[in-house]
Amino acid sequence: MNKMESNNNGQEWTIEISRENDAIKLELVNINENRISKSIKNSDFIIENVHDIGRSLEYEYNKKYNVILEPYNISRIIGLVNDLIIAKANK
């Protein structure tokens, strides 16, 4: 398993990424160490799906912790996913 943590620069959210065969596992972590994870097919981890991936992480987080995230948090999560997809593409 190859694991890389995104740089959160002291922000509230972090996404950890790991690769497992033909899937990518994203783990969304907030500042309180609340975590949710989602597996995505490697072929679906592309810039065209960044919004859908980010919103699905947000949905799973909301469901697990029975909260509704503010729009600025959703934007930050989507931005972190975007950064990871770009980093993966540049390798």
Image (cartoon, rainbow, N blue to C red):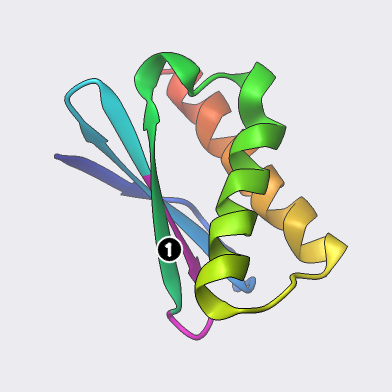
Q: Tell me where the magenta segment starts and ends, as one range.
A: 26-33
Q: On the rendered structure, is 58 left or right of 65? A: right
Q: Residue at x 75, y 70 (%)?
A: 69
Main secondary structure type of the part rendered in magenta: strand
Front in this rendered view, residue 67 or 19: 67
Q: Amino acid under label 1?
A: Ile
Snapshot quadrant of residue 12:
bottom right
Front in this rendered view, residue 39 or 84: 39
Residue 63: x %, y % from top left: 57, 67
Q: Residue furthest bottom?
A: 32
CA neighbours of label 1 inside 10 A, class few (<14), some (14 to 19), many (20+): some
Snapshot quadrant of residue 54:
top right
Q: On the rendered structure, is 7 left or right of 62? A: left
Q: On the rendered structure, is 51 left or right of 31? A: right
Q: Residue at x 64, y 71 (%)?
A: 11
Q: Residue at x 47, y 51 (%)?
A: 6
Q: Residue at x 68, y 78 (%)?
A: 67
Front in this rendered view, residue 47 or 22: 22
| Residue 14 sits above or below residue 81 on the image | below
Secondary structure under the numbered disc 1 in the rendered image: strand
Residue assigned mark 1:
36
Front in this rendered view, residue 7 or 46: 46
| Residue 85 sits above or below residue 38 on the image | above
Tell me the quarter of the image containing the C terminus: top left
In reply to whether residue 52 is colored magenta, the answer given is no
Residue 32: x %, y % from top left: 50, 86
Residue 33: x %, y % from top left: 43, 80
In reply to whether residue 29 is colored magenta, the answer given is yes
Question: Visible in this render: residue 7?
Answer: yes
